[in-house]
Amino acid sequence: MSPPKANHAPAPDKVRIARALISVSDKAGLVELGKALADRGVEILSTGGSAQRLAEAGVSVKEVSDHTGFPEIMDGRVKTLHPRVHGGILARRDIHADAMARHDIPGIDLVVVNLYPFEATVAGGAGYDDCVENIDIGGPAMIRAAAKNHDFVAIVTEPSDYAAVLDELATHDGCVTLALRRKLAQRAYARTAAYDAAISTWLAGQLGETFPPRATLSGSLVQTLRYGENPHQQAAFYVTGEKRPGVATAVQLQGKELSYNNLNDTDAAFELVAEFEQPAVAIIKHANPCGVAQGANLLEAYRSALLCDPVSAFGGIIAVNRSLDAETAEEISKLFAEVVIAPDADEAARALLATKKNLRVLLTRDVPNPAEPGMMIKQLSGGFLLQNRDSGRVDPAELKVVTKRAPTQQELADLLFAFRVAKHVKSNAIVYAKNGATVGVGAGQMSRVDSARIAAIKSAEAAKAAGLAEPLTKGSVVASDAFFPFADGLLAAAEAGVTAVIQPGGSIRDNEVIAAADEKGLAMVLTGMRHFRH
């Protein structure tokens, strides 16, 4: 079936609102809107709870069933799906006037509809049947009809848009302009698209389809950013509605507006620090850690993290996995940082950080669960990649000791710590660690041996800056996010002073790498799990 061709005059700039249909699940601002419309002599049609709320507030309202002459049936499933409703919404006033008169269909000039709370019902853990009952049918049908006919009808789907409509009615003598009608139509289609995406995604989950034939994604605009990764790029921040603690759900206490890079780096920092059960601190620069440590308290962890690479830490992002205390906040305030993110902060810590006016401080109430399932997306030209979040974690009991010497308990603890950090370092990733703290990080190199050497160089520089006699890597352990393709990367780590190695294994030259470790007296364990991060 082919769609009809347009054969009508240009849309009028202003449309007078004489009749409105209001049917909302979210009652915020409903009474105020109804009163303002009634005061302008607008006839109001409504249904169910919306009609009752308006009537109780003294607003004159006509039930849709009285308008259509047909009662609500099937437990309210069928109430607005009627020609007198959809004809009034869809009719073009310039070419359908005869049909409207012939069938006694009054025009509806304003449609105010928001949808059954399907997303909230799913998020609340409701059962299958309750979720299905909260799939709105009449609402999306009216929204799409009004949005299509925006030449003559204004459609409002969010209480936040009530003010714009009322302002235009006041400014334009009871009329709404074409510019606003078009803007509202776009928002309406975006809303129904997001609603359908939520339903589709939920149903796919119910069917056990991780990757259905058609994937749908949606987000709500939080803010338009000053620019993107670079000043010549435009950017905006959208949220999906996922309740995972982090930058999307945090409250910003103070500081300048977050930039594109701030948001990206802060997310990376908080996801990393959430990996640890003990008090931990992560300092991030350009989405890579320049220092990570755990300790008996945050202050101890912060000092150890900063020691790893104090030069790179300047202007970085600091994440902690405990409520921020005053002592740690005072120490942090000595460093120029862009963002501090924490689950919470005590009053003394907040007061101390408040003296740093440009410092952004974010509080999240909780830390994300590293094992929680979720999806990650990466844009490609003409498509995108979708994958599960890397929630993999090594079980110490499943580590395979492949060298003549097994790691000591302290080495094992540091190996596991280093491997968790390596999961959050851009590949090729090499992480040196000692006593629950990173002492050298090599990130994003094209060869693993270069990552090992760079991390060792930075460790030596950090030790020199701290006035230490030898590089921090002496007596450390090393983690590699993927296997060593040759022995050279392991030998570079051995030269830096490591005593133990953790790596996934799986190279055709594993035996050569193991032999090199034995020759150097190193302990080495294989995880069987890699953590590429591109």
Image (tube, helix red, strand yellow):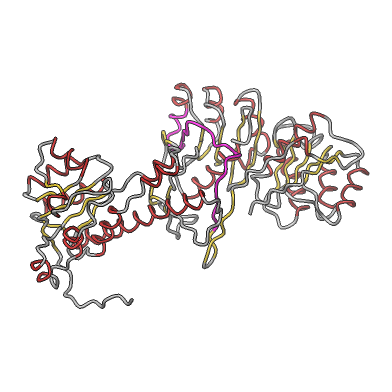
**Residue placed at 65% from the left, 23% from the top?**
296
Describe residue 399's horizontal placement relative to residue 39 as left or right: right
143 over 504 or under it: above or below: below
**Residue placed at 24% from the left, 52% from the top?**
156
Quadrant assignment for the N terminus: bottom left
Q: Is residue 412 magenta?
A: no
Q: In the image shown, does 143 or 331 lie closer to the viewer? A: 143
**Magenta span: helix, strand or loop, mainly?**
loop
- Quarter-wise, where is residue 401 in the image? top right
Q: In the image shown, does 193 or 10 lie closer to the viewer? A: 193
Residue 451: give x, y in percent of width and height: 73, 50
Describe residue 467's horizontal placement relative to residue 19 as left or right: right
- Quarter-wise, where is residue 182 in the image? bottom left
- Where does the magenta region start and end? 353-378
Name the residue at the front extreme. 74
343 over 68 or under it: above or below: above
Residue 279: give x, y in percent of width and height: 61, 27
Q: In the image shown, does 325 or 169 lie closer to the viewer? A: 169
Q: Is residue 359 magenta?
A: yes
Quadrant assignment for the C terminus: bottom right
**Residue placed at 68% from the left, 37% from the top?**
308
100 over 482 or under it: above or below: below
Residue 522: give x, y in percent of width and height: 87, 39
Describe residue 274's horizontal placement relative to residue 449 as left or right: left
**Residue placed at 33% from the left, 50% from the top?**
136
- Quarter-wise, where is residue 16 in the image? bottom left
- What is the number of callouts on the image? 0
Q: In the image shown, does 219 or 124 lie closer to the viewer? A: 124
Residue 73: give x, y in percent of width and height: 24, 49
